[in-house]
Image (cartoon, rainbow, N blue to C red):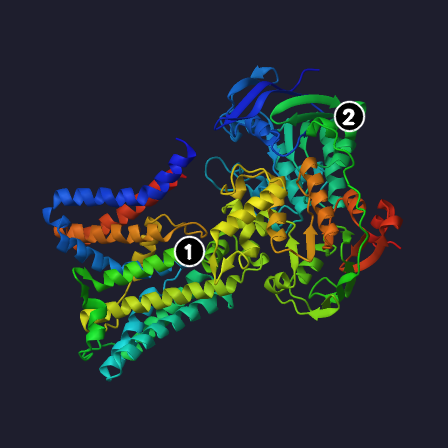
Amino acid sequence: MKPIISMTNISKSFSGNKVLNDVSLDIFPGEIHALMGENGAGKSTLMKILTGIYSKDGGTIEVNGATVHFKDAKEAEHAGISVIHQELNIIPYLSVMENMFLGKQLTYGKTGILKTAAMKKETKRRLSQLGIAIEPEKTAGDLSVGHQQMVEIAKALATDAKVLIMDEPTAALTDREIETLFKVMNGLRKQGVAIVYISHRMEEIFRMCDRISVLRDGKYIGTKPIQDTTMDEIIKMMVGRELGDLFPDRDKSAGKEFLRVEDLSGPDLLENVSFSVKEGEVLGVAGLMGAGRSEIVETLFGARAKSGGKIFIEGKQVKIKNPFDAKKAGIAFVTEDRKSEGLILGMSVRKNMSLPNLKTLSNQGIISSKREKASARNFIDRLNIKTHSPEADVKNLSGGNQQKVVIGKWLGINPKILILDEPTRGVDIGAKKEIYNIINELTEQGVAIIMISSELPEVLGMSDRIMVIHEGRVARIIDKKDANQENIMQAATGGE
Amino acid sequence: MSRKWTHTLQTAGPLIGLILIVIILSILSPSFLSLNNILNVLRQVSINALIAFGMTLVILTGGIDLSVGSILALGGAITAKMLAGGMDPILAVLIGLLAGGIMGAINGIVITKGKVAPFIATLATMTIFRGLTLVYTDGRPITGLGDSTFFKMIGKGYISYVPLPVIWMLIAFVILLFVLKKTVFGRGIYAVGGNEEASILSGIKAGRVKIWVYIITGVLSAFAGLILTSRLNSAQPNAGMSYELDAIAAVVLGGTSLVGGRGWIFGTLVGALIIGVLNNGLNLLNVSPFFQQVVKGGVILLAVLIDRRNK
């Protein structure tokens, strides 16, 4: 069989930095090909070159044996290469059908009058081909993220896509939606569509993909058929060394109870949520997407209105009406969505890091730039944040380093309680391990940690106790020694 | 072009523009560069600049304030009426400024607590404050302000050659420059404009930052009203009409982003100077006032287009 896409010796530099160095990659029809590598390894750059968003400095790209030079994404699309981005390109106020036919509406000749009925029928047909039933007239923004993604896939297939590039497609999906997506992907594979699958989730890759290619520091490391390799081998290829145990051991045992939450309730979802966290303890929070995990910590942090419940710190009741109060009580909150909630993307690393901490970095409201710079330097070193300068805009950092900036900004207040909502989402495996080490360092210092995660291995590996949430209530709190994937999933889905 | 270069060019862009305009005008009109004329321009600029400084803070938070012209009118009218009634001039001035602050606070509270979009909220208060001015003055100019030297000095005084309004403008500029660069409050302004959600989740009281920004703008607008009242020796009920547009134009010409989070007060000063210099130069060149508007609008458009290009 001949490859549908063949990239040979691709090179690319940005302002003198070589981000891709002689990278070659073949994609065959009907395969799901995982592209892996740490953040900054060059995966997205390679895909952007393939889809014509960036121009390449050297090398050749062949599609079906013919050399191509895409000048923009539209040309790549015409050649049958489509991308499903992590951030979906759905226009929320338009209907599913309008989204599907955006820019290529069916009209009566050149009159500009729309053939609504025909488009409706076609939309329905394409979605049902994927095994999805969505009303074409539904407003796209009202759909679940999973369904929005299906609309995008259907839209891509409508342009006769032969190659689909999927960038972290499961990041925002519920477990059930992931299953649907995988079913659709299997169907596409049978039809001979090639899928390039970019993800940090090892389990998914080993379940779904046929071959794995690894990039590291802009270089091509190798391609392995899935049946001939192991997770350990892939991780080693990605980080260039043995990583050791992903979840480092903690030898310190938890101290006395530090935070107690009693009967926390919210106006729409939470019902009588009670739990406690000890000094130096990690309380893992598991549950399905939409179960109310984030709502619990947002309510605790004062970012969401509560309808009832009490919060005690060291036995004393505290009133938390807004995040300012929470911060004063020594609570730090690393939010789930770092781009919209955690960072001010257009601001420098230094300014982002000092944001919660301006009070201690200033005298009478005047910021001490000396202390601010020293503090930024300190956390950049301590958390090993890779940025060419503290003055660089935080939006130029990779996902893992952005996440470390968010963690760093909260360490500045010397928190007693640290809430982590999906701390390693979209973070590569090296940075992941660094974050786990930071968590352990903090527990050493007696910080009480609440960690929400959708990755069960992470919850199991890092927590002392695991609180499982089901439909806004605490379904079960399980000790580490009794916990396993089965009993967590059972509690999360409402089973006994 | 390297990143650093584009950056410098972008920040220096408004200044280069101003210098170019000054050079062209001084060639076309010999009297333009005389000390007298330059001080004259600076004095004319000061009122717009004071308002535009406040507007810069508002726009940095991602908001806008259309009510500045009405605040200017009502603030001036209140002080004028009290002066006419024989009140102590210092007290009368303080009450006028306080009135400006209260009007700003109303804007801020409606926007933050009432969650009304700044454009709509201040469009409404612009009309309300203007209406109140008309009610308060009965639609007639207030004259007979007495002969307090203190009050006359505000708009008409000089320190050696320099008109006092220019001094007020420079003082406000230096203070706000410091506030924006060096204080927790200033950092809060940029943060709230850059990402309000993230700012709140960092424990910044975004609502409070915004209310204060509108209060400052209200006080500065009322102060501009006092300068105008002092200069004209009367308060006009329709003073400050469409001043909000000149202020916004100065902010935009200075390179501050209307989306919020990015910008600087120095740019606004330059922007106000560009507008002032154009007004003055076109007058000297005997360009018809009708056509002057076309030129002014064209310059604003050109500046924004160049700015887009660089991005």
Q: Residue drawn 68% across and 45% down?
A: A172
The residue under label 2 is: A226
The residue under label 1 is: B180
In this orientation, does residue A13 appear? Answer: yes
Q: Secondary structure at mark 2?
A: helix
Select label 1 or label 2 by which is in front: 1
Q: Residues within 10 Å of mark 2 (few under 14, many from 20)?
A: some
The correct choice, above or below, for A220 with respect to A244 in the image is above
B125, A451: nearer the viewer: A451
The correct choice, above or below, for B198 with respect to A382 in the image is below
Disc number placed over residue A285 in the picture, else none: none
Question: Could you tell me the amino acid type at mark 2?
Answer: Ile
Rendering coords of residue A321 (x, y %):
63, 67
In this orientation, does residue A493 appear? Answer: no
Label 2: chain? Answer: A
Quadrant of the drawing holding the N terminus of chain B: top left
A192, B114: nearer the viewer: B114
Quadrant of residue A182 within the rendered picture: top right
Rendering coords of residue B268 (x, y %):
33, 53
Q: Residue drawn 69% across and 54% down?
A: A419
Question: Could you tell me the amino acid type at mark 1?
Answer: Leu
Residue extending furthest left? B30
Label 1: chain? Answer: B
Q: Residues within 10 Å of mark 1 (few under 14, many from 20)?
A: some
Rendering coords of residue A291 (x, y %):
75, 55
Q: Secondary structure at mark 1?
A: helix
Q: Residue drawn 22% across and 64% down?
A: B164
Quadrant of residue A38 within the rendered picture: top right
Cα gap from disc 1 to disc 2, whole angstroms: 56 Å
Quadrant of the drawing holding the C terminus of chain B: top left
The correct choice, above or below, for B146 with respect to B217 in the image is below
